[in-house]
Every structure is written in structure tokens, then in C-alpha cells.
Amino acid sequence: MTNNATRSERSRRLDGAAVHGERGQVAENSARSADGLTASRLFRADRRAAAVRAVLKTKGLYSFTSETERDAVATTLGDTYDAAWETVAPFYVRAVHRMLGDLREEVARGALLLVLGRDAENIEKVIHWFDPRVRARCVDIRINRETIANALADRERNHGETFPELAEMFGNLAWNPPTTDESMAGASTNLTTLLRRQGLPVDDPEPPHDLIVLDNGMRGTTRAALKQMYWPHARETLVRGFYLFRAGVYGDPQPNADRGYVYDLDAEASNGGRNLDELPDDPDLKGLTFRTNTTLLLLECLTSGPWLTPDRIDANGRSVRRLARNEPLLEEGLNPARRSARFFNVRVFEGVLRIVRAAIGDCARYAALSERGGGDVQELLRPGHERMVRNARAWASDDLAAMHPVLREIAGTYCWTEYWPTIVELADAIDAAGLSAESAQGVWAAFDELRDDTARAAFVAAAVRGRFTAQGSPSAP
């Protein structure tokens, strides 16, 4: 890939419109004019072209060797944008829109909104288009479970502090992100520096304004840890969480501190915050579908953005992060038979993450313009919300034919299923048997035809025993 190839005439025309400042106005006018369906199509086409162009121009991401190669990647990105616009974008925007009334009330009382990590960056993007005044109270806090765990461990082991209020909560979750002497060194001080740099009142034992953690969800561990580390004696309502998904945990020192806007389950209703192994009933497609690991991983894969979760916080209080292009594509636990050749490239993967995020922002922009014209955002986005839920259910139940075809390609290339350990076991058996690439491909294709765990287990058991037919597939015992 090089960036020196001549662009297509269509791309040149689009770029010319952007240079003359027409791009944003065209999008806004198309959202406000014509009937709703036509307006949506005009706006989507305009923003799709701009998003593809922006991703292709991302510094250091692509280096094309031919215009054919560039056009192929552009097509893949455009297809991804369409899939996101039709599924994950309306689902996500609709959920955040439900938060807005509560967020406005909190901001009116002076609250700060803590944008927690990469998932919550989408929430911030949606807020931006609906209410810039609320967006102005957002503070980016780029941390994750590992940075919190290391800060807690540093305080406990190196500074003699104890956090009995967290012990029961974390113990019930088996919450044990890995920590080492090296990762703990300075972790608490570095976290404090980051929070102080971002304007959090870490030196005030009773801050006057509340802090609202924004995140996809769901159990409140980071919210609880921040409260106990920095403001243990402050009012119970000081640190709270607004999430897409809430599943309460037994032993939470502030059990009423969080709320969810797709589902909102207390500890009793969520079995202590544990994800389900099997799809729950979701007759009205409200979103309980996202109670399983498989469906949550699908959503996280689509919405996590181009930056990897932080490796650590440095001594200057800055999160050390890498781009997706700097990490090999995940292959372990994924069935090669579901892999899409056009998506199986780490730079395409980063492009996918960037353009899904663009589609979420564009959907929010369109919905906000519609609302200003008197439209009902919840009804506007309902079809896309329900489409996303149906696709997630189809993915989790292996009903791949029922999925959006591009979403199926993306999920098959990048996303784990509930039975990923079985896939790892089969991969090991194939390697041990020394099968040719062609034979291995046949094994994976046969495995992919199976639709229940018992059949998969029997298939893998035969493979582990080395019982392969001449064609490579496991034979009966």
C-alpha cells in the first residue's frame, strides 16, 4: 500500500466540495429538507463519503500500491459504515439520548461528567451533537480496570492502606486484574496525577459538586474504587455512574449509585452482576439480549475505537496507549471458517473501528437535527435499535443467515463467541495432527456447521484423539 496512487474522479469531486466548505452544509441541509426517508438517505450518503475519505487519509494508517487496492479498502469501509448506520449507531445513540435529561439536571447542579475510557468516548460524541453545554462538562479519564487495580494494589502493599468497603464487592466478582511489582510501582501517584491534571478534586475530601461516571457499564467497580480511594468519607451520592447497561453487584458500598439506560438491574435481578451463558428472553427487543458475554463482546468490538485500552499511566499522569494497528489481529479462539478475507488485516481493522465511531457521531448529528425540527428521537431510532438487538441475538445463537451480511463478516473476523475455548482446543488438535492447510480448512468448515455444544464437544474430542479421516475431518470414535 502506498499513498501516491491517483484517486478516482469521484473522490476528487468529493474532496473539491470539502475544500470549498460545502460538505458540512450539504449534510445539514439534507437532514432538514425533504421527507424523512429521503433526508436520511441524503445525509447518510454525504457523511458516508466524508467518513471513508477521512479514514483513508488517517496519518500512517494506509500505504496503497495501486488505486485498485485503495478502492477495495474504501468499499470495505463504506460497507462497514452502512452496517453501523443501520445497527449499532442507532442503538448506541438511542441509549445515550435516554441519558440526556438526567445529564442536563446533573450539569445544572454543577456536576462533572467523567468519560471513562475508550467506550465512553462514544457517549461523549453523542452528547456533543445534542447539547454542547453538557459536553462542556465532560472530562476524559483514560483509565481501565488494570490501572485501577494497580493503583489499589500500590496503596495496599506499598503504602499500608486498606479498603474493606471494596473487599466484599470485588470478592463477589472475582475481580482480579493482574498486578506485578513493576506495574504497581508508582501506580497510585500516577493515577492521582492524571485525575488532578483533568481537574478532578482529588485533594478535597468533600467536593461541592458531584462526579458522574459515564461508561458502557456495568457493575460500578471503577466508580466504587474512585470513591473509596479519594473521597471515602464524602456523601454517598458524590460519585455515581450512568451506563448503557447496569448489573448491580452484591457488596457494593453504594448500591444505589448507578443507573442503566438500556437495562438497569440491581444485584438481585442480575445474579450479582454475572453475565449469562445463554440468551435471555427479550420479547420487545429492549436490550436484555446484551446480558451475555458473546453479545457484549460484539458491541465492544464494534464501538471500542481505534485506540487500545491503556497499558499504564506514566509519571506525568498521561495514559500510555497504542493504536489498533500496533497489535496483531486476534486469531486465538476465532474460527477461520468465518473469517472474511477483506476484513482480515490489522489496518483494515483499525479503519473499521474508526468508521464505526464516525457512523455513531453522524447518527447522533442527524438525530439531533431531527429533534430540533420537532422529531421524536426515540421513535426515529427504534428500528435501528431493534435491528441491532436482532443481529446480536442471531450472532449469539449462531443464526448467521439472519445477520446483516457485513456485520456477519465483521463479527466472524474479529469477535469471540461463548464457545471460544472449544475453538482453541480444536486449533491445538489440528496443529498436533499436522494437517495441511487444505485439510484444516475442511475441519473448520465442518465444525462451523455444528449448532450445539454437545456436538462441538464430540467433534473436538475426536480431533484431540487424533481421529481424522483421509479428508481431514474427525471420524467417529
Image: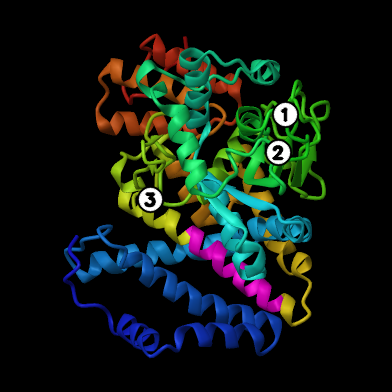
Segment colored magenta: 356-370
Mark 1–mark 2 Cα distance, whole angstroms, equals: 8 Å
Closest to the observer, 302 or 256: 256
Q: Residue at x 30, y 69 (%)?
A: 71
First in sequence: mark 3 or mark 2? 2
Q: Residues within 10 Å of mark 1 (few under 14, many from 20)?
A: few
Vertical relation: 215 (above or below) 425: below
**Hey, which quadrant is residue 202 in on the image?**
top right
Mark 1 and 2 residues: CB-CB less than 8 Å, in contact? yes
Q: Position of residue 281 (x, y in %)?
A: 79, 38
Kind of element beneath mark 3: helix
Where on the picture, by quarter, is residue 190? top left
Q: Kindly identify the amino acid type of the residue bearing the numbered disc 2.
A: Glu
Which residue is denoted by mark 1 in the rendering? 233
In what element is the residue under mark 2?
A: loop
Mark 3 against mark 2, which lies toward the viewer? 2
In-front residue for pair 315/410: 315
The label on residue 349 is 3
Drawn side of residue 172 relative to residue 409, left or right? right
State which tag comes first along the sequence, 1 or 2: 2
Identify the residue at image location x=79%, y=72%. Answer: 376
